Amino acid sequence: MTFSKPILATAPNKVKMNWWEYWVEHCMMTGWQSIRFNFSIWGDLMGSNYASYALMKEDDPEAECLDWFWASLVEDDVYPKKFLEYLMQMVDDIETGKEEVIPMDDVMANLKNKWGEEDDEVE
């Protein structure tokens, strides 16, 4: 079972997409990927192969599979062309050094230090 899907038709070191790349490589391929995912869940549901859908011990695997199936029918992973180009521009800006990237470890360490000091003062 997949939980994330690649954004199709996006390439590194490229910030614009032509219409062919957008419609054929992104819209059509993402649509087919969604249809394949929907049929995969439907097949699991029809074949009683839903044991892996329960994440917690108290979850009902069949109910979880059914919920995934209905949720997958309304999924739309096709993004607007402007949004994809915005993401590609952002990646290019980060790779070329135009934008500063703060590592998540530093952010979490700063948060722990800030909140850890305040917790000590309260006690």
Image (tube, helix red, strand yellow):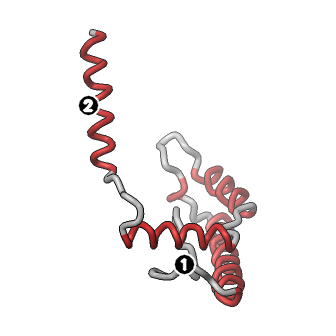
Horizontal and vertical percent position of residue 112? 29, 33
On residue 81, the disc is none
* Quarter holding residue 83: bottom right
Using residue 37 as the reference point, say whether residue 12 is left or right of it.
Answer: left
Using residue 55 as the reference point, say whether residue 83 is left or right of it.
Answer: right
Q: Which residue lies furthest to the bottom in this view?
A: 20
- Residue type at numbered disc 1: Val
Of marks 2 and 1, the one in the foreground: 1
Front residue of this view, candidates 18 and 10: 18
Q: Which residue position holds label 1?
A: 15
Q: Give the number of marks.
A: 2
Q: Is residue 85 above or below residue 70?
A: below
Image quadrant containing the C terminus:
top left
Q: Which residue position holds label 2?
A: 113
Q: In this view, does 37 lie above or below 23?
A: above
Which residue lies at the image location 69% right of the left edge and 90% below the top edge?
A: 20
Horizontal and vertical percent position of residue 108? 32, 41
Which residue lies at the image location 68% right of the left edge and 80% below the top edge?
A: 32
Which residue lies at the image location 50% right of the left edge and 66% below the top edge?
A: 90
Which residue lies at the image location 52% right of the left edge and 65% below the top edge?
A: 4
Say what secondary structure mark 1 lies in: loop
Q: Which residue lies furthest to the front in this view?
A: 98
The reply to whether residue 109 is visible in this rendering is yes
- Residue type at numbered disc 2: Asn
Front residue of this view, candidates 56 and 82: 82
Q: In this view, does 83 lie above or below 101?
A: below
The reply to whether residue 1 is visible in this rendering is no
Horizontal and vertical percent position of residue 69? 69, 61
Say what secondary structure mark 2 lies in: helix
Q: Which residue lies furthest to the top in this view?
A: 123
Front residue of this view, candidates 113 and 56: 113
